[in-house]
Image: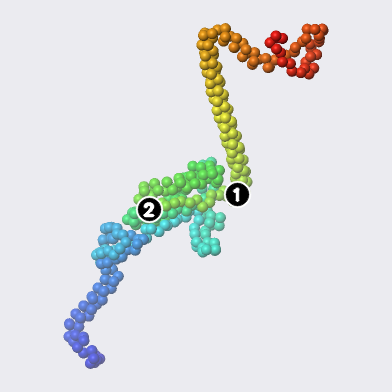
Amino acid sequence: MAPMDSRNVGLLPQEPATRYRFYSALFVFLCLVVWFVWGGPFYSVAQDEQALVLTLGTYTKTTGPGLHFKWPWPVQTVVTETVTRVRSVEVGFRTIHPGRPGQPGRYREFKEDREMLKEAKMLTGDENIVNAELVTMYKISNLRDYYFNVEAQDDTVRILAEAVLRQVVADYGIDDALIRTRMEMEAEIRTKLIELAQLYGLGIGIEDVKLQQVQPPDDVSSAFKEVATAKEESQKLFNEAEGVRSEKTLQAKGEANRIVFAARGMAAERVNLATGETNRFLKLLEEYKKAPDVTRERLYQETLQRVMPKIKKVLVDPTAGILNVNRLENIAVPAVTATEGGR
């Protein structure tokens, strides 16, 4: 046995039993230090995280952000997960690299990948084939359900999204699926996914769904594009006709209102005029009852003053002999004022 360095004499125990106990205690102390650092009684949760505390593998509680106490490993373990991040799953394509500003991303698409084509190909309600791509975005809403109820969460959500997409596409004809009802389809897919997530207890909240593209197969793509163009042109003409119809309708309503208001004004005028005439007649009647002769003579003269200016008058001198009265209509006769005696 090599002689012990005199400098270490007194630092280590000399007896074998004492030395064994010393090294055992040192080993236990180092294990406790490592255990305290790596699996000790404290753990922290970040601001955007939640943590599941498991006691001997069984769920105990869920904790939020901050510093927390737990029983050391292996009695209790902690699983942390980011719950504020929006996650996405894709149906019909996969994002390999999202790309950078100014640079396109890289994707696996159904046009080039047979596996993606199997996901994207589906049947419409009128038995036509289309290829559809869908993105589903979700957040973790219940970490316990998300961790314990589902295995391979993203794959599960993708399978559900694909099933719902096929169901919704099968409810629409190809024209609606390609052109008209994309927003309605997205809303319907989102509603059905929310219902399925709650039914199966996935512990997620569906944030949004987006139909990336819905296309016919490549073999008939050009024909469908021509049909779509024709339908867009038809819709454009229909909208223009609707605009003209609305304009004409508004003009007709305006003219009708003008006529109605004019008729109402004329009716009011006639009523007021008739009322005035009636009141005047009643006043004359009262005067006539008071002085019949005077009133009769006044009415006679007023009538002549109204009527005579409208009548063409020809005064004939009885000493002029025979006169062709019919030719007098073409002769300019100077105005003659008749006296009372010449009437």
The residue nearer to you, when weighing 208 against 32, is: 208
Which quarter of the rendering shows the C terminus? top right
Q: Say if mark 1 contacts mark 2, CB within 8 Å.
A: no
Q: Residue at x 17, y 82 (%)?
A: 18
Q: Residue under circle 2?
A: 204
Q: Residue under circle 1?
A: 221
Residue 162 visible in the snapshot: yes
Q: Indicate whether 138 appears above or below 321.
A: below
Q: Earlier in the sequence, mark 1 or mark 2?
A: 2
Which quarter of the rendering shows the N terminus? bottom left
Q: Residue at x 78, y 18 (%)?
A: 332
Q: Residue furthest right?
A: 322
Q: Rounded to the nearest whole Å, what is the CA distance between mark 1 and mark 2?
A: 37 Å
Tell whether 30 sits left or right of 171: left
Q: Residue at x 32, y 61 (%)?
A: 65
Q: Which quadrant would residue 304 be assigned to in this image?
A: top right
Count of marks, rendered view? 2
Q: x%, y% of residue 261?
A: 55, 28
User: Dot 1: within a 10 Å radius of its alpha carbon, few (fewer than 14), some, or many (20 or more) residues?
Assistant: few
Tell whether 99 sits left or right of 228: left
Look at label 1 and name its amino acid: Ser
Residue 227 visible in the snapshot: no
Q: x%, y% of residue 37?
A: 29, 71
Tell whether 18 sits left or right of 279: left
